[in-house]
Structures are given as structure tokens and as C-alpha cells.
Image: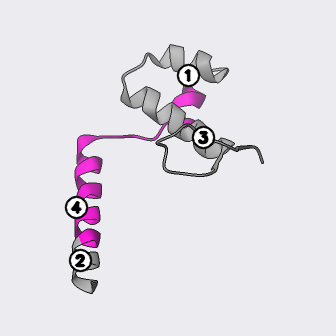
Amino acid sequence: MAYFSQPPNGWGTKRMGWHTFLHTYTTLLHTNSEDVKVVQELLRHGSAKVTLNLCAQAVTPAKRKAQQRVVSILRDEDKQAD
């Protein structure tokens, strides 16, 4: 499997696999409301269906809010453990 040996500063990770990067890149493009045809071509997919169904993850306000609640709970538990 291919890895990025030195990701850009500020990524907070030492290694990122190609598969993880692909999904992250696609999701960020989708979240930024980039045209699906542009994303398809950047990823060199044969169809937009492949791009949307296999690579992009849905990022909605409801999902973000739910995730923030979980993080908040975990952070509160970490503080109580100290």
C-alpha cells in the first residue's frame, strides 16, 4: 500500500494511506460544493456515480452536530478522569 511519507505541516498525522487520502480528498471536495463532474475528472473515474457512491462521505449539519456531541461527552469524561 502506498503512503505519504511526509504529509504537509498541520495535518496532525505522520502517515496517511492512499485509500484514506482518496476518501478524505473526495469528501472535502464534495463538502466544498465542487461540481461532481469536476471531482469525477480529478479522480479519473469513469462515471460520477462511482465518485459519489464509493468515495464521497455525506457530511451534513446533523452528522456534524451528532459527532460534536460525542466528542463533548468524551472530553468531559477525560476531564473527570484527571
Residue segment shown in magenta: 49-75
- Residues under labels 3 and 1: Cα distance? 28 Å
Nearer to me, 27 or 36 = 27
Gap between marks 1 and 2, in whole Å?
45 Å
Q: Which amino acid does label 2 sit on?
A: Lys
| Residue at mark 4 | 69
Q: Residue 79 carries which label?
A: 2
Residue 77 lies, in percent from the top left, at 25, 78
Q: Earlier in the sequence, mark 3 or mark 2?
A: 3
Label 1: state its secondary structure.
helix
Left or right of 61 in this view: 15: right
Q: Earlier in the sequence, mark 1 or mark 2?
A: 1
The residue that appears at 29% across and 56% down in the rendered structure is: 67
Spot occupied by residue 80 in the image (x, y as percentages of width and height): 22, 83
Residue drawn at the location 55% of the way across and 27% of the way down:
49
Q: Closest to the observer: 42 or 11? A: 11
Asked if residue 70 lies in the magenta stretch, the reply is yes
Q: Residue 48 carries which label?
A: 1
